[in-house]
Image: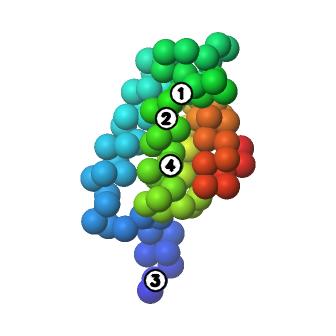
């Protein structure tokens, strides 16, 4: 395997690519519309003030590709939405599959 293949390899199975991309796009939309954290629980936010659907997506991503995929997705969110929202997503995912922000 060439160095290029190692560097460009995605942390998820090729057959799950469209699913992962769809989940990333959903996270981008959540971040743009509502953020991943709130000051108060209720509505889209659970008792820990974390966006419910973003947490569900985090759990799905962990099932697909573990922590490596979650890190990949946070980097993609950072690139699209900036450091603040990427940090909020990271904190929203606290304890999902052993995730530590």
Q: Which residue occupies 55% across, 15% down?
A: 42
Query: Of callouts 1 and 4, which one flags the residue occurring earlier in the amino acid sequence?
Result: 1
Cβ–Cβ below 8 Å for labels 2 and 1?
A: yes
Q: Is residue 56 above or below residue 64?
A: above
Q: Which mark is residue 51?
A: 1
Residue 74 in percent (x, y) is at: 56, 44
Asked if 92 appears above or below 58 in the picture, the reply is above
Q: Residue at x 63, y 24 (%)?
A: 47
Q: Nearer the viewer, residue 82 or 41?
A: 41
- Mark 3–mark 1 Cα distance, whole angstroms, equals 40 Å
Q: Select label 3 or label 2 by which is in front.
A: 2
Residue under label 2 = 54
Which residue is more in the foreground, 68 or 99?
99
Q: Residue at x 37, y 43 (%)?
A: 23
Q: Which residue is mark 4?
A: 59
The mark that comes first in sequence, 3 or 1, is 3
**Which quadrant holds residue 78?**
top right
Disc 4, SS: helix
Relative horizontal placement of residue 90, taking residue 70 as reference (left or right):
right
Q: Is residue 16 above or below residue 78?
A: below
Count residues near mark 4 (Cα–Cα under 10 Å), then give few for <14, some for 14-19, many for 20+.
Answer: some
How far across and how far down the image is residue 6, in percent?
49, 75
The local crowd at label 3, few if under 14, some if 14 to 19, many if 20 or more residues have their Cα within 10 Å, is few
């Amino acid at each position: 395997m060439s160095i290029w293949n190692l560097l460009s390899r995605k942390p998820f199975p090729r057959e799950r690519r469209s699913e992962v991309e769809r989940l990333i796009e959903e996270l981008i939309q959540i971040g743009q519309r509502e953020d991943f954290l709130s000051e108060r629980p209720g509505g889209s936010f659970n008792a820990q003030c974390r966006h419910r659907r973003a947490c569900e997506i985090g759990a799905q991503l962990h099932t697909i590709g573990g922590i490596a995929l979650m890190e990949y997705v946070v980097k993609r969110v950072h690139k699209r939405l900036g450091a603040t929202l990427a940090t909020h997503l990271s904190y929203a995912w606290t304890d999902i599959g052993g995730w530590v922000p």
